[in-house]
Amino acid sequence: MCEEYFLVKKHPAPTGSDINSSVSENLVFVSRGYVMQTPLKFHATNTVSCIDNRLCDLYLTNMFKVRNTILSDDIATAKFDCDLPRCKGACCVVGDAGAPVVKGEIPVLHKAYQVLKDEMRPESVAVAEREGVVIGSEKAGYEIATVNKQECIFVKYDENEVAYCAIQKAYFEGRFNWEKPISCHLFPVRLKRIAGFDYANFEYVPKLCSVACEKGENEGTYLADFLEKPLIRRYGKEWFSEFINYCRESRTKK
């Protein structure tokens, strides 16, 4: 069952009617008839109001909930289809940090490095040997190491200078049994774990996403459909069926 939500973040004070709310850190999920227990004080009756001054200046973003995952509404309605010849694999290269990874993926990435080390770029191997394949901590979060804080160490380039993932290439060739980190597979959707829920947001970055959005618009491909495989990988077929049904219903309301 899907439920409509709002996500409350810092910005102009919001108003609403007949809603309940919950808070985790500086985020507030509010829905009609649904309450989550959280450590911070926030109150909503006929209007949304802030008890803790640190959480004043808020705004509401449309969300929807599928089981224990809360998603931004634009995931249902945006159009998106990767256009590698034009973007040249920018999502593997552009940025100021490596791809986020979860703790359980770290041993797999270390194994991938050992399998692929001899075919990786020398500068990537140098970074991995000096800093490690994965950097960070459980508290701060883990990410794949990068070259010059940009290119993922697993990036390689084809004859047209298009960046591609060495792990994924090995997977498609049957040389490795794992495709890539779930954060890479789900991009441009990013997940955060908050109060026992996954929060999924469409992370639109013009430099990375504009050509894919243009191709999606031209070919009529929705982001939700484009991400079918990684979403099933993450949540399963039954979850995806509920999710895609909501997306299709949502589009008819626009």
Image: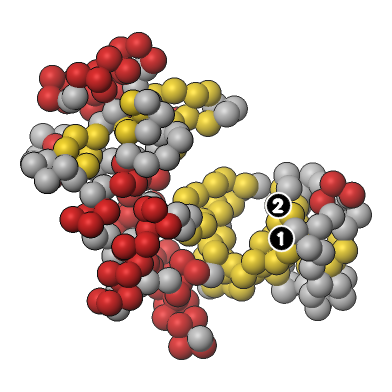
Q: Which x, y percent locates residue 82? A: 27, 60
Say which quarter of the image contains residue 114. Answer: top left
Q: How packed is label 2: few (under 14 Cα within 10 Å), some, or many (20 or more)?
A: some
User: Circle 2 — which element?
Assistant: strand
Q: How many marks?
A: 2
Q: Residue at x 46, y 88 (%)?
A: 252
Q: Which x, y percent locates residue 241? A: 38, 71
Q: Nearer the viewer, residue 130 or 241?
A: 130
Q: What's the distance in space between the residues labelled 1 and 2, CA to CA?
A: 6 Å
Q: Which x, y percent locates residue 175? A: 10, 34
Q: Residue at x 18, y 55 (%)?
A: 85
Q: Earlier in the sequence, mark 1 or mark 2?
A: 1
Q: Residue at x 89, y 50 (%)?
A: 52
Q: How packed is label 1: few (under 14 Cα within 10 Å), some, or many (20 or more)?
A: many
Residue at the spot of label 2: 27
Q: Nearer the viewer, residue 151 or 2?
A: 151
Q: Is residue 165 left or right of residue 249?
A: left
Q: Is residue 81 visible?
A: yes
Say which quarter of the image contains residue 94. Answer: top left
Mark 1 in CB contact with mark 2 (< 8 angstroms): yes
Which residue lies most toward the top here? 130
Q: Is residue 115 left or right of residue 80?
A: left
Residue at the spot of label 1: 8
Q: In the rendered image of this protein, does residue 51 appear above or below residue 12?
A: above
Q: In the rendered image of this protein, does residue 58 appear above or below residue 32?
A: above
Q: Amino acid at mark 2?
A: Leu
Question: Disc number at residue 64?
Answer: none
Say which quarter of the image contains residue 170. Answer: top left
Q: Amino acid at mark 1?
A: Val
Q: Which x, y percent locates residue 182? A: 36, 45
Q: Is residue 249 left or right of residue 51?
A: left
User: Circle 1 — which element?
Assistant: strand
